[in-house]
């Protein structure tokens, strides 16, 4: 394996990881921002108010995006397995 191929494999792995985690992280961040704005305006400082909406939103996002995420992961895995003979030589 040429060092450039190893770097490409690493880049592809990082790219697919960021691509799969981005929707969940962005939704969690948006809900956290909305909750913090709500807490700042109402001056309610309840700790469970910060966690429960984020957990619910990320769970719903995971249910919504799970089919797309599974397709992306299986496509990446198939491409990786098909590239094994080229990497061995």
Image (cartoon, rainbow, N blue to C red):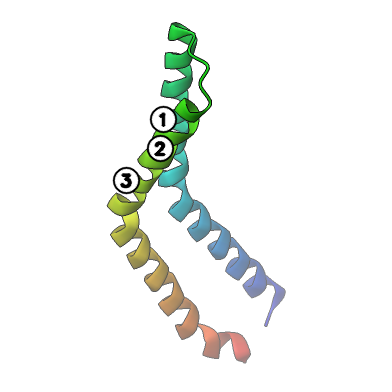
Circle 2/circle 1 CB separation < 8 Å: yes
The residue lying at 71 percent from left, 74 percent from top is 3
Which residue is disc 1 drawn over? 31
The residue lying at 59 percent from left, 61 percent from top is 11
Q: CA distance from mark 1 to mark 3?
A: 12 Å
Circle 3/circle 2 CB separation < 8 Å: no
**Viewer-proximal residue among 76 and 41:** 41
Which residue is disc 2 drawn over? 27
**Viewer-proximal residue among 80 and 27:** 27
The tag earlier along the polypeptide, 3 or 2, is 2
Question: Closer to the camera: disc 3 or disc 2?
Answer: 3
Vertical side of 80 occupied by 16: above or below: above
Pick the quarter of the image with the N terminus: bottom right
Vertical side of 51 occupied by 45: above or below: above
Which residue is disc 3 drawn over? 60
Residue 79, percent across and down? 44, 77
Q: Residues within 10 Å of mark 3 (few under 14, many from 20)?
A: some
Mark number, residue 56: none
Q: Residues within 10 Å of mark 1 (few under 14, many from 20)?
A: many
The residue lying at 32 percent from left, 45 percent from top is 60
């Amino acid at each position: 394996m040429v060092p450039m191929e190893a770097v490409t494999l690493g880049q592809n792995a990082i790219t697919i990881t960021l691509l799969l985690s981005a929707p969940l992280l962005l939704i969690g961040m948006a809900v956290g921002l909305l909750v913090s704005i709500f807490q700042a305006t109402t001056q309610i400082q309840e700790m469970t108010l910060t966690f429960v909406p984020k957990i619910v939103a990320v769970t719903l996002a995971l249910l919504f995006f799970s089919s797309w995420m599974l397709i992306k992961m299986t496509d990446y895995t198939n491409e990786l397995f098909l590239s094994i003979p080229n990497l061995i030589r």
